[in-house]
């Protein structure tokens, strides 16, 4: 009996949790597309999510491109086609690794901080204080993060892509001796607009996922535990859920759309 | 002006409020006392509709605030001030910007007028010179006073004070109470003050109520409460560790 009761309770929790999350996104969209937009808050969030992530993204991008090139070289060398090193690195990064890894890095760096910050505002009554002024907390806290995510993620992904391809170039051309013209020259022959668009759409949707999940988890801090413990729980859940959703959504986008 | 009727609320599996009935008249100062963790803050939050009751209702000016839509609610809240227990200052903003925030964002006042009102309120709570400090850079007592300035700048008709003097040294605490008393004379707001320092707060209050085990256990003039024969109220007032209230 207990087992069935627990199963029922956790199912209800799960479904109502998903409903709340969907509602949260709808609210965000409604407030996002009706004035006023808090431009200063938006710029601050773009700086936080975007600008301040550039160094990390560049670093991860460079090493991803370098290791791809290294691994790719040995594999391609076995089948005697190192000429395809450039397209292989570029395609893997642009279609897949760029958006996914940039999304995961931004989740770890910015998503967790956003959840913690909004969560602290929740438990210290700062969100209540905004409401008491007759103002809408969504406009000040959630909408700016949402747009900042949608704007920043594609740009960070482009940076990741470029630096990743360049990292692959360094290893492939400067270290392993693939011809510079071969590495770069073959890329346009195998890369078409759809591949670039695939990466772009993915990065935009990951921007939505990160800002959606991190704001939601922060905003409802306290429902799963009160006080500082509630914030730490919410932060963990936020990072795990964002990362899982990015990887799952990535599969479906790849499978269904392209 | 404020009526609370048969209010029930459970939080994280605990029946915090179990049928609270309370009314506060216009222009009155009511002090609310009670054991720590017995739901005083939760009760105030229901009056501001930051919490929704499981059962019962809250009326402000004879109007049930439960069913209000968001614009009606924001109308009611514009007459309401809430001094939160921890102050609830925005940590990302300086003291000045905190106090200016409602004037700028809600009322849309001009810079000059905002400046004048902010500096006046900060002066009133004794925080002149701390305008550019951030909440994390100032002491708890200063945070509380900055939060008070942010509530007062709004000139609400009803003010809910959640422990306005807790954590302040005796002199500042006294000054804050004097300030509340003086402002009350000038602006005649209606107010509920939650406090543990009832001896001092009773001096400026018209009535006092004690919340105990989810209901209003005692209600009367401050003197009546101080002289109450009820063993629970007596024990609370005297602070005895022996008696009907078990604190373990
Ligand atoms: N948001 C919340 N979620 C879950 N439980 C809560 C929440 N807020 C308060 N509680 C619980 O409700 C009870 C009453 O808390 P409340 O803060 O109202 O007490 P209080 O009388 O104000 O105490 P104190 O004098 O210490 O401030 C406590 O058990 C507390 O844990
Ligand atoms: Mg309290």
Image (cartoon, coloured by chain):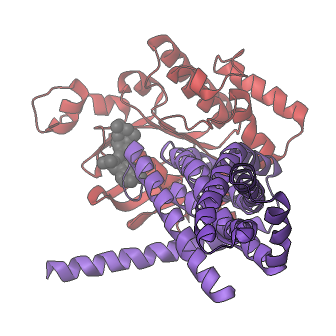
Chain colours: A purple, B red
Q: How many labels does the image show?
A: 0
Q: In which quarter of the image is residue A65?
A: bottom right
Residue B220 in sight: no
Which residue occupies 49% across, 11% down? B171
Q: In which quarter of the image is residue B198?
A: top left
Which residue occupies 55% across, 16% down? B175
Q: Position of residue B47 (x, y in %)?
A: 50, 53
Q: Where is residue B38 in the image (x, y as percent from the top left)?
A: 30, 45
Q: Position of residue A12 (x, y in %)?
A: 36, 79
Lateral position of residue B204 relative to residue A64, left or right: left
The answer to which of A110 and A186 lies nearer the viewer is A186
- Image: B186 above or below A96: above
Name the residue at the bottom extreme.
A256
The N terminus of chain A: image quadrant: bottom left
Q: Position of residue A151 (x, y in %)?
A: 78, 60
Lateral position of residue B245 relative to residue A145, left or right: left
The C terminus of chain A: image quadrant: bottom right
- Image: B98 above or below A233: above
- Image: A171 above or below A182: above
Q: Quadrant of residue B111?
A: top right
- Image: A59 above or below B208: below
Lateral position of residue B217 relative to residue A21, left or right: left
Lateral position of residue A130 relative to residue A12, left or right: right
Residue B206 in sight: yes
């Amino acid at each position: 009996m207990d087992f069935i009761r627990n199963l029922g309770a956790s199912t209800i929790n799960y479904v109502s949790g998903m409903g709340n999350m969907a509602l949260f996104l709808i609210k965000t969209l409604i407030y996002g597309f009706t004035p006023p937009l808090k431009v200063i808050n938006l710029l601050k969030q773009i700086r936080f999510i975007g600008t301040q992530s550039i160094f990390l993204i560049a670093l991860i991008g460079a090493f991803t491109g370098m290791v791809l090139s290294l691994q790719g070289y040995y594999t391609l060398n076995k089948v005697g086609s190192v000429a395809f090193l450039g397209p292989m690195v570029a395609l893997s990064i642009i279609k897949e690794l760029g958006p996914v890894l940039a999304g995961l890095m931004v989740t770890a760096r910015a998503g967790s901080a956003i959840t913690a910050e909004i969560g602290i505002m929740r438990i210290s009554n700062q969100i209540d204080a905004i409401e008491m002024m007759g103002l809408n907390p969504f406009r000040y806290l959630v909408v700016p993060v949402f747009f900042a995510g949608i704007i920043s993620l594609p740009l960070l992904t482009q940076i990741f892509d470029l630096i990743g391809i360049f990292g692959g170039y360094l290893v492939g051309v400067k270290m392993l001796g693939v011809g510079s013209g071969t590495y770069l020259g073959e890329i346009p022959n195998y890369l078409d607009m759809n591949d670039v668009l695939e990466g772009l759409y993915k990065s935009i949707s990951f921007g939505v996922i990160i800002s959606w999940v991190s704001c939601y988890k922060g905003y409802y801090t306290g429902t799963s535990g009160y006080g500082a413990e509630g914030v730490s729980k919410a932060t963990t859940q936020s990072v795990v859920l964002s990362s899982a959703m990015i990887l799952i959504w990535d599969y479906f986008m790849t499978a269904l759309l392209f | 002006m404020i009526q609370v009727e048969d209010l029930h609320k459970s939080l994280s599996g605990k029946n915090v409020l179990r049928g609270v009935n309370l009314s506060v008249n216009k222009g009155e100062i009511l002090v609310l006392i009670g054991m720590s963790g017995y739901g005083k803050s939760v009760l105030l939050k229901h009056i501001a509709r930051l919490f929704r009751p499981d059962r019962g209702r809250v009326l402000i000016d004879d109007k049930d605030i439960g069913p209000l839509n968001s614009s009606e609610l924001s109308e009611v809240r514009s007459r309401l001030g809430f001094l939160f227990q921890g102050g609830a200052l925005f940590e990302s903003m300086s003291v000045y910007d905190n106090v200016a925030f409602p004037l700028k964002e809600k009322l849309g006042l001009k810079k000059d007028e905002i400046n004048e009102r902010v500096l006046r309120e900060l002066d009133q709570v004794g925080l002149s010179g701390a305008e550019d400090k951030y909440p994390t850079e100032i002491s708890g007592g200063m945070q509380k006073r900055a939060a008070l300035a942010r509530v007062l700048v709004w000139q609400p008709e009803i003010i809910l004070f959640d422990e306005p003097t807790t954590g302040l040294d005796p002199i500042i605490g006294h000054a804050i109470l004097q300030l509340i008393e003086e402002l009350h004379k000038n602006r005649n707001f209606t107010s509920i003050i939650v406090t543990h320092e009832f001896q001092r707060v009773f001096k400026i209050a018209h009535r006092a109520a004690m919340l105990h085990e989810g209901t209003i256990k005692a209600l009367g003039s401050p003197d009546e409460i101080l002289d109450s024969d009820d063993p629970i109220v007596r024990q609370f007032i005297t602070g005895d560790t022996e008696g009907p209230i078990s604190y373990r």
